[in-house]
């Protein structure tokens, strides 16, 4: 699993943006499925040591989702969103609201080469706050958990 990423920067829109790229030793069918099934999302979609006690998703364009992340002290961080694009095994995009009212646009692209999948994540944030300052580390830890989930399925 390779990790190529950068910190949050100001993008062309003038808003904070984050781009990450990670290569997983798994076919994109499995990687994509990990994002589309709530029982799988619940296993990995949080930066350790946070957990996901609740995940609801309607995996279709216009479909809503809600993911609740929980810290070891019991503090919960909900994310509510709506899918804006789903191209099977190629792209997922959504708009979401996270804690502190931060609006986030996220696009995840999947590319397979020789049985490995490159995952490219791009986020645009409405404004900078503590969540954006920790986004790089949070995504890195979250994608580490996705890697563990994929290893358990291959």
Image: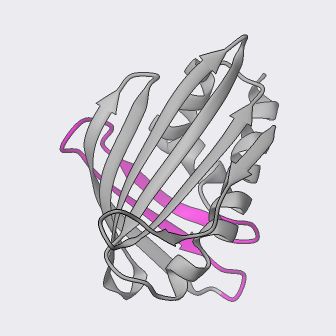
Residue 152 in the image, given as x and y percentages of width and height: 80, 33
Residue occupying the point 65% across, 51% down: 44
Residue 116 in the image, given as x and y percentages of width and height: 72, 21
Q: Which residues are magenta?
A: 47-73
- Count the marks: how many? 0
Q: Is residue 18 magenta?
A: no
Quadrant that contains the C terminus: top right
Residue occupying the point 73% across, 61% down: 141
Of all residues, the one furthest to the front in this rendering is: 12
**Depth order, front residue of 145/6:** 6
**Depth order, front residue of 72/116:** 116
**Depth order, front residue of 5/137:** 5
Residue occupying the point 29% across, 66% down: 13
Quadrant that contains the N terminus: top right
In the rendered view, would you say 57 is above or below 69? above
In the rendered view, would you say 145 is above or below 126? above
Residue 37 in the image, given as x and y percentages of width and height: 48, 37
In the rendered view, would you say 34 is above or below 14? above
Of all residues, the one furthest to the top in this rendering is: 114
Q: Is residue 81 left or right of residue 106?
A: left
Q: Is residue 31 left or right of residue 146?
A: left
In the rendered view, would you say 17 is above or below 5? below
Q: Quadrant of residue 112?
A: top right
Residue 56 in the image, given as x and y percentages of width and height: 39, 53
Q: Is residue 64 magenta?
A: yes
Q: How is the image coloured?
A: one colour
Q: Is residue 87 left or right of residue 112?
A: left
Q: Quadrant of residue 137?
A: bottom right
Residue occupying the point 48% across, 35% down: 109
Q: Quadrant of residue 25?
A: top right
């Amino acid at each position: 699993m390779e990790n190529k990423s950068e910190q949050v920067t100001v993008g062309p829109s003038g808003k904070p943006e984050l781009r990450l790229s990670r290569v997983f030793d798994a076919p994109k069918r499995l990687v994509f499925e990990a994002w589309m099934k709530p029982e799988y999302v619940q296993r990995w979609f949080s930066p350790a040591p946070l957990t996901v006690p609740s995940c609801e998703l309607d995996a279709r364009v216009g479909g809503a989702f809600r993911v609740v992340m929980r810290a070891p002290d019991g503090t919960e961080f909900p994310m509510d969103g709506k899918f804006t694009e789903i191209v099977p095994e190629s792209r997922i995009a959504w708009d979401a609201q996270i804690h502190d009212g931060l609006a986030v646009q996220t696009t995840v692209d999947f590319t397979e080469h020789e049985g490995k999948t490159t995952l490219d994540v791009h986020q645009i944030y409405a404004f900078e706050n503590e969540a954006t300052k920790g986004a790089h580390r949070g995504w890195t830890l979250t994608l580490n958990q996705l890697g563990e989930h994929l290893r358990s399925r291959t």
